Every structure is written in C-alpha cells, then in structure tokens.
Image: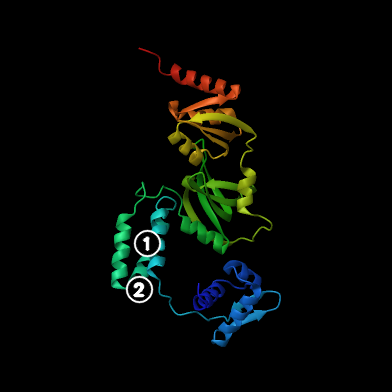
Amino acid sequence: MNRVDRLLAIILYLQSRRYCTAEMMADHFGLSVRTIYRDLAAIAEAGVPVMAEAGLGYRLMKGYLLPPVNFSEQEAMALSTGLMLAQRMTSQSYLQLMQSALDKVKAVLPGESKSRLEHLADAMATPTSAPPMQADLSLLQQAIARRQLVQFCYQKADLSQSERLAEPAGLIYYLGRWHFIAWCRLRSAYRDFRTDRISQLKLLPDSVASRESFNARDFIRQSMPDAPLQATISFTPAAADRAKREWWQGVSGEIYQADTVQLTLNCSDWRSLASWLLSLGDNATVLAPAELIDEMRQQSQAILARYPAG
C-alpha cells in the first residue's frame, strides 16, 4: 500500500470509530507508532480535522465525512464473492441487504468492469441456491448494536415452545448455524439460542444495559462439552476428509497409509461418536478402544432389529 492509499485508509479507519489510539492504528496497519504520528500530521496538514483527546485517542471532528468513495473492480469482485458465500450462512432478509449494497457498488463501476463483474457472478455458485430458514439476522444485529430488548418464540429440541424476552449479547456461527447469545429473562441466565428455532421475532423499544465482563465467544467455548476421550479410526480418504470437516469435537492425530487414513478423534462420549460414525457406513473402521467398538456393535444390532429379514 502506497502512502496516499494508506493516508486515505487511516481517514476511513478514524471515520468508522468514535476514538482510537495511535497504538490501535499501528497494530491495524502493521506500522510503527512513529509512522502513525507522521501520517496523522500529514492528514491534518491536508485539511482533515483530526482531533486528539487525552486519555481517549484520536477522532475526526464531529460532522466531517469523506465524499463517496469509488470501488475498484477487485473490491467489487470481493463483495460479489461475499454475497455468494452469504447464501449458505445468512437469512433471506440479510441477503437482500447485501444485494442492495452490491447494486450500489455496480452503479459506480465503469461499463467494462460492470460487465466483467456480472460475468463473474454468473460463473460462481454454491451447492445451495437459498439460505437456510432462520431468524432475521439483520434484526438481531440491530438489537445487539442498539442494545435493545428482543421478544421471540423459541422451539426447544423436544418441539415444545415458549415465549422469551432476551437481552442481546452476540451472534456466533458454529456447527453450521448462527446462534444468538443473550441473557434470557425467563431463565435469568445467558442462553444459546439457535436462530433456526426462533420465530415471531420482535425488536422492542426497551434499552438494556450492557453486562460487564461478558464475552459471547468465551461463553460458547465454556459451554462446549469437554472431549477427554479419544478413538483411533481408519477411514477411506474421502471419509477422512469428511471427518476432518464435520467432526466438531476435533481431530488430534493423522496418519496416512497406503489406501486409508488413520485419525484420532476427540469425543465427550462414545454414544455420540458411534452414531456419527455409522453415517459413514463401511468407510470407517474403529480400531480402538474396545468401548467404542462395543457401542458400534450395540447400535448396529439395534438398527438391524428394526429391519428383520423376510
């Protein structure tokens, strides 16, 4: 990045934040603090009103905004790719917002760049053509950003439903779904709500105070079950690739052999691991321990009992 681009990037960085320190900017741009000070001086000399406040950091003067920025062709392509990937990870309403943003980017591109972007969009695809059914992510984002109370109906694993009032704390994507982390007033505790089980979502006008020392990522890590058990399993190469992508409790060992891959899988209990391994059919063979082999045998026999011969 040349210096002119860097100065513009620093202005945009300041514009997107209330305050930031020289150390924060140095860390973000990979520069020394001394270089940041020189760049801030150059920006101020160019007439950009950079304000400094003791104990808080730097900010742009209230009301100052840069004029509209033209996107490069590569930036527009990156946004187009992001829109495609969002088809697998967001709600329909959020997808519409991203499409609207991309349309605005395309509107300021030169004719040839716009044509190339449309050709690229036609040439890229994901296996699914529509996002999964789930709560309105954009509404949940607003609730988090504005610290507003939300009301919704939540369906539990046993299909029972209950009305919830929740104070938003975070949105986390894991295990193939978005999860809404919030303080549930019904349970008087933080809860992890799967967004595909949320319905009748409403953003209420009530403001909520932030609860100190809570981090949604740490909450998820702490709520994950421990995986103290380990199993050694032989996979076909294709099944091993699937195991490394899908087994959410982790892989701690990997040995490639002639036509198989031996993996060491972490797990919290043999039953859940055996159930998942059965979905691979004869593409996976448990080598150890004996407890998992017994569990595989018991579950297999229970399945066979449901389909008697003749």
- Mark sitting on residue 99: 1
- For badge 2, the amino acid type reads Val
The residue located at (62%, 39%) in the rendering is: 225
Name the mark nearer the viewer: 2 or 1.
Answer: 2
Left or right: 176 as drawn, with respect to 25: left
Q: Is 152 or 191 nearer to us in this picture?
A: 191
- Mark sitting on residue 108: 2
Q: Is 103 or 233 nearer to us in this picture?
A: 233
Give the mark count. 2
Circle 2 crowding by C-alpha within 10 Å: few under 14, some 14–19, many from 20: some
The residue located at (30%, 65%) in the rendering is: 116
Residue 21 spot, x, y in % from top left: 65, 72
- Mark sitting on residue 110: none
The residue located at (51%, 59%) in the rendering is: 141
Q: Quadrant of the C terminus?
A: top left
Residue 18 spot, x, y in % from top left: 60, 73
Q: Tag 2's secondary structure?
A: loop
Please report contact status of discs 2 and 1: CB closer than 8 Å, yes or no.
no
Q: Quadrant of residue 288?
A: top right
Residue 227 spot, x, y in % from top left: 62, 36
